[in-house]
Amino acid sequence: MQATMEIAGGRAVGPLAALARREAAGLAAAVVLLALVLAFAGPGAGPWQTGQDAYCYWLPILTDPYARSDWTSPIAYVYSPAFLQAMAPLTALPWRVFLAAWTTLLLLAIRFLSGPRLCAAAIVFAGLEVGGGNIHLLLAGAIVVGFRWPAAWALVLLTKVTPGVGLLWFAVRREWRSLGIALGATAAIVAVSLAIAPSAWAQWVGVLASSADKTTGTWSAVEIPLILRLPVAVAIVTWGARTDRRWTVPIAAMVALPALWFGGLSMLLAVIPLRGSDTHRDVAATVDEQGPDRSVRSVVPAPVQTA
């Protein structure tokens, strides 16, 4: 009988039992973090308040979305009107109910990106991001999904905007259909949203223009201007596209964030599923070139022999 075994507490544990334990650890970490977020939720919860970014999404109203739009201020909404319109069913909820739902969504994004084995560690890694309630984890998820369904890139383009540099992946590889779907889906959403709230879109253009040359002026971000980071992001995604490394795309998108918040480092979790997809393609390419017997023996370790 062949099986992969894991040692825990001095005795062998089957793969299903080990996986169940890690799932339980991830669930426990998620519950604890959700409880902490709700316990210290702002506004008015002191210096350790949580949910500050989430509050920026819950507070604006559709009739005047940019009443607070100075993105260096603690409370500001600077994303497109389309995002706020899409969020309307959630923002109609009471604040703490909204925060619970939003935090749960971020935790689910972590589970999607990390898988069951790394979920608990990933929650610890992204704890600052979940505590603040920003959308970096959702952007990371959209980038991963966007390789199969490019329309997901609309979330990136209609919120943070500049991480859309990752679309260069399709351009460099001449995957015009995927690029067209990403841009076309975004344009369709813009068209519908513009018809609903044309004046809000005019305001958003002004918000973007006024924010272009601002720095964060806060301890919670890396003080490197976008104008210096953007060429680096372009180089990263171009190299990745030419060498078939999908995991470079979320890294480039993170580098190209309008402000490189420390919470934005959580986008690196997207490397986990994308690095795995690169490995699978490498194995497939080896099979095609060398034949199944030689390639499989060379890349897949032999299973542990058990009684």
Image: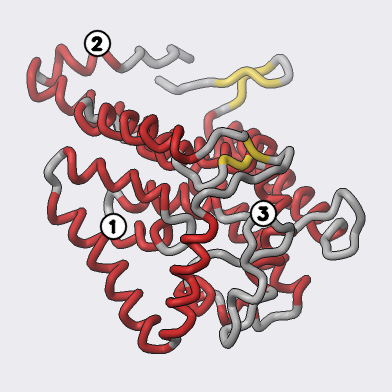
> In the rendered image, which residue does mark 2 sit on?
298
When asked about the image quadrant of residue 193, the answer is bottom left
Front residue (pair 181, 204): 204
> In the rendered image, which residue does mark 1 sit on?
149
- Give the answer, above or below, for where 83 lies relative to 107: below
What secondary structure is marked by label 1?
loop
Residue 72: give its label.
3
Q: Is residue 104 left or right of residue 37?
A: left
* Amino acid bearing label 2: Ser
- Between label 1 and label 3, give the one nearer the viewer: 3
Mark 2 neighbour density, 10 Å: few (under 14) some (14–19) many (20 or more): few
- Between label 3 and label 2, give the one nearer the viewer: 3
Which numbered disc, 3 or 2, marks the residue that appears first in the sequence? 3
Mark 3 neighbour density, 10 Å: few (under 14) some (14–19) many (20 or more): some
Q: Position of residue 144 (x, y in %)?
A: 38, 47
Q: Which residue shows up at 44% across the image and 41% down it?
A: 256
Q: Position of residue 15 (x, y in %)?
A: 53, 30
Position of the N terminus by quadrant:
top left
Mark 1 neighbour density, 10 Å: few (under 14) some (14–19) many (20 or more): some
Residue 159: give its label.
none
Q: Which residue shows up at 53% across the image and 60% down it?
A: 210
* Amino acid bearing label 1: Trp
Q: Is residue 19 visible?
A: no
* Amino acid bearing label 3: Thr
What secondary structure is marked by label 2?
helix
- Give the answer, above or below, for where 118 lies relative to 3: below
